[in-house]
Image (tube, helix red, strand yellow):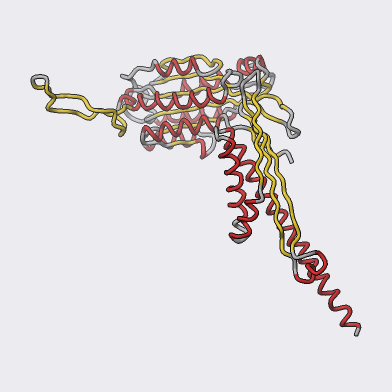
Amino acid sequence: MMTALILPMLLGGAGLAVDTANLMVSKRQLQEATDAAALAVSGAMANGSDTAAGQKLGKDFLAGQLANYMNTTDTATIKNATTVAIVTNTDASTGAKSYSVSVTSSANIPLTPLTSFFAGRTYPVNASSNTISGTGSGTGADGAAAASNGISMEILLDESASMAENTTTVKGTKCVINLLGICIGQQTVYVTKVEALKQAAATMFDALDKSDPKTRFVRTGTISYTNGIKGQSAVAWGTTAARNYVNAMTLNPVGGTDATAAVTTATSNIKSNIYGTDTESVEQAKKGNKTSDRIMILMTDGDMTGNSVDWSPRLDQNVRDGCAAAKTAGIKIYTVAFMAPIKGQELLKYCASAAGNYYEPNTMEALVASFKSIADNAIKPVNRLTN
């Protein structure tokens, strides 16, 4: 008789323990899914997505996360119960945009039979995630504006003779045999490396301008080099001076390749000191940027030859030493080995601050995409969970 009374209580207690553990796991999974969805939406909005697309992304992303744990029917039900709210704010003084994203979701978790006798067949769990993101300026965990973060960037571009060589991208045709005003022989014309570089740089500058329409955060400079520095535009607000310099680069470059002076000069131009009295810290502070990222982009299509046509181990090591010094000085380095030989690739892999900062494009289209990717990473918005 006693067993008959106690057994249901024991079974009920065991069922409650199982349900409690299951609910805790389900709550964690749902919270992680809403967190991931909110961060994904924040990043998409900062990269130009519209509200409708952002809301769809939030629901799809959450469903994708939950598909790892739940069946298709349950995942679809939770997706339909999810709301994604997006608020866009524009700073009147800077033009920089920030985005507040809220993802809220709920799920009804089935209970064991004995627990359901007391608490119903399912029990609701809820999760909500909020993020604040912005380009150009950071935001604190409470949603208040934090100290602005600027970018000081030096762009180092190879302007040696090999940059006059063709890429694989067809530019058009030209008549090479003309008979009585009739073209009877045509030749395919290809985009040259330097022409491709100009287009890639323009794409990068456009992305930087879009992120900083009122030139409050981004400062850029350009150094072109052959077997030494050929010329440069001083680091200045916005991209105008750097863009103009690149546009004016010759379409008929000459000379060998040695990036040593370009790297050391760029490092000297943008490195910070502990006192905040370096040029870039002072200039950034004038516009309220308490901190600023220091970024170097090093691009080449060859290896280090100097005035000769042969690779020089000494010059290669000099550039490596310069890159190491730049990284020690806190400068983040992105490298682009455009149609470069093995020695050039190895050098730029070493110089890059991280494996993901190294690009190896072999076509004009890939070069353009590489420079766009660098810009997007350089201006990547601060996306923070605030819940």
Q: Vertical placement of 94 versus 373: above or below?
A: above
Say which residue appears at 61% left-offset and 44% top-offset. 58
Horizontal side of 247 relative to 119 (left or right) equals left
- Residue 347 rendering spot, x and y as whole percentages: 44, 34
In the foreground, 82 or 9: 82
Q: Vertical placement of 154 versus 116: above or below?
A: above
Say which residue appears at 33% left-offset and 20% top-offset. 255
Horizontal side of 311 relative to 55 (left or right) equals left
Asked where in the image residue 70 lies, by quadrant, the reply is bottom right
Horizontal side of 349 relative to 62 (left or right) equals left
Say which residue appears at 76% left-offset and 66% top-offset. 18
In the foreground, 279 or 103: 103
- Residue 111 rendering spot, x and y as whole percentages: 74, 65
Say which residue appears at 84% left-offset and 74% top-offset. 10
Asked where in the image residue 281 lies, by quadrant, the reply is top right
Q: Vertical placement of 331 versus 57: above or below?
A: above
Horizontal side of 339 relative to 380 (left or right) equals left
